[in-house]
């Protein structure tokens, strides 16, 4: 079916689509808030500026428009008939960027969740939100476990460092005792008027051969 809009009309229509605070994003935020979650939105300090970030749960959520992010097999992902190549390249670029952003976030320890626009229509919304809540809570349990493991590793590393310091101190003290013994013997022998029990060269560096 041919596009019923001209190139200029299509451009104007697309340019009016919001990039943030979209209706799908607002639906997800409202549902998560009602479920007791607290979060930040549009966090620019993270790769890709996730739409919703739950730090407590190590979770970054992207609420993606099906057209702009190329949702495969979705009825909302239909390339316009006018200027087709331009839109195909634009969507493919978005998909590559999305994949790269997800990898960067995961490398930092974040759990990345994508919520598609089509999954928030009235017939699927309840199931989508329920599944999302389960994923977030699962991520929270995982985050707590990883945090506990990190604390255990840190405590073990600190104990090992303390043990090394003690062993080094003991070794230094032992070495000091060993090298101090001849000097004490020499001082005691001279004070008693007895000859030095070992060779002169062992104790007096100034003696000549």
Image (cartoon, helix red, strand yellow):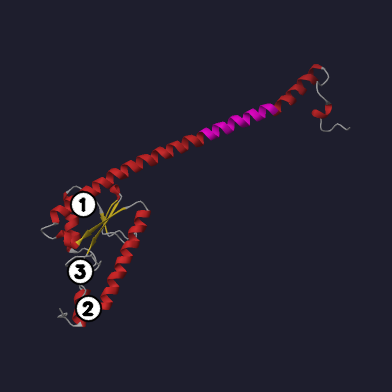
Front position among marks 2 and 3:
3
The residue drawn where x is 58% and y is 32% is 169
Q: Mark 2 falls on what kind of element? A: helix
Q: Closer to the N terminus: mark 1 or mark 2?
A: 2
First to last magenta residue range: 163-178
User: In the picture, residue 93 is in which quadrant?
Assistant: bottom left
Mark 3, Cα crowd under 10 Å, few <14 / some 14-19 / many 20+, is some
User: In the picture, residue 94 is in which quadrant?
Assistant: bottom left
Return the residue at label 1: 132
Q: Closer to the N terminus: mark 2 or mark 3?
A: 2
Q: Mark 1 falls on what kind of element? A: helix
Would you place residue 127 above or below residue 153 in this image? Answer: below
Question: From the image, which quarter does the N terminus lie in?
Answer: bottom left
Q: With 172 as the anchor, is 30 left or right in this view? A: left
The residue drawn where x is 71% and y is 24% is 181
Return the residue at label 3: 77
> Can you name the residue that lies furthest to the left here?
123
Mark 1, Cα crowd under 10 Å, few <14 / some 14-19 / many 20+, is some
Q: Nearer the viewer, residue 173 or 163?
A: 163
Residue 132 in picture, x, y percent from top left: 21, 52
């Amino acid at each position: 079916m041919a596009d019923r809009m001209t190139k200029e009309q299509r451009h104007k229509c697309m340019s009016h689509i919001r990039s943030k605070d979209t209706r799908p994003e607002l639906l997800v935020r409202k549902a998560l808030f009602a479920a007791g979650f607290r979060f930040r939105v549009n966090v620019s300090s993270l790769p890709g500026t996730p739409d919703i970030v739950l730090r407590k749960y190590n979770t970054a959520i992207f609420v993606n428009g099906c057209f702009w992010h190329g949702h495969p097999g979705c009825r909302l992902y239909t390339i316009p008939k006018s200027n087709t190549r331009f839109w195909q390249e634009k969507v493919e670029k978005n998909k590559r960027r999305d994949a790269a952003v997800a990898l960067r976030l995961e490398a930092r320890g974040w759990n990345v969740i994508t919520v598609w626009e089509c999954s928030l229509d009235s017939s699927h919304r309840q199931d989508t939100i329920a599944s999302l809540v389960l994923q977030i809570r699962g991520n929270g349990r995982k985050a707590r476990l990883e945090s506990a493991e990190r604390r255990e590793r840190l405590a073990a590393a600190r104990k090992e460092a303390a043990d090394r310091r003690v062993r080094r101190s003991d070794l230094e003290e032992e070495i000091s005792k060993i090298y101090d013994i001849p000097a004490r013997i020499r001082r005691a022998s001279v004070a008693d008027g007895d000859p030095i029990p070992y060779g002169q060269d062992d104790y007096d560096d100034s003696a000549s051969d």
